[in-house]
Image (cartoon, rainbow, N blue to C red):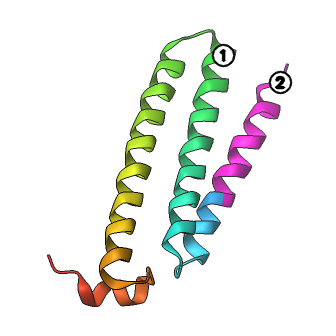
Amino acid sequence: MNLLIFHFVPISLFFVGLLGILFNRKNILLILMSLELVLLSINFNLFTSSCFLDDSFGQLFAVFVLTVAAAESSIGLAILVIYYRKYGNIVIRLAHSGLRG
């Protein structure tokens, strides 16, 4: 089969996630979900390319990217829970005033 057919879905998922990051600046949960969608599309692209080229390094790298994405999302959600417990909301505009560093 043609590889272009299998690359259309990850490219469209990548742009949907990128648009979610660029156009949504108020809700941090939607930004995190859009970031996960971008990482998932990159993994899907790596997996389809490695299957088409009959190479296992792309699949191995996709597994490593999935573990990093899982760690990133768990740390991000833990930070959000702590911030919500401290301030009572997760509005991004108010987050700049309470954070120092």
Residue 51 lies, with reference to residue 99, above or below; the image says: above
Q: Quadrant of residue 91?
A: bottom left
Question: Which span of residues is magenta-colored?
Answer: 1-16
Residue at the (39%, 67%) spot, across then down: 80
Q: Quadrant of the N terminus?
A: top right
Classify mark 2: helix, strand or loop: loop
Q: Which residue is mark 2?
A: 2
- The image shows residue 47 at horizontal and vertical percentages of 61, 25
Q: Horizontal placement of 45 versus 98: left or right?
A: right
Q: Horizontal placement of 3 versus 92: left or right?
A: right
The kind of secondary structure the magenta stretch mainly shows is helix
Compare residues 99 and 54 and report the one nearer the observer: 99
Compare residues 20 and 5 and report the one nearer the observer: 20
Residue at the (64%, 51%) spot, across then down: 14
Q: Which tag, 1 or 2, sits closer to the chain's start?
A: 2
Residue 73 lies, with reference to residue 19, above or below; the image says: above
Q: Residues within 10 Å of mark 2 (few under 14, many from 20)?
A: few
Residue 11 lies, with reference to residue 77, above or below; the image says: above
Residue at the (77%, 41%) spot, across then down: 8
Q: Amino acid at mark 1?
A: Cys
Q: Which residue is mark 1?
A: 51
- The image shows residue 101 at horizontal and vertical percentages of 14, 76
Q: Quadrant of residue 95?
A: bottom left
Query: Between tags 1 and 2, which lies in front?
Result: 1
Q: Amino acid at mark 2?
A: Asn
Compare residues 83 and 41 and report the one nearer the observer: 83
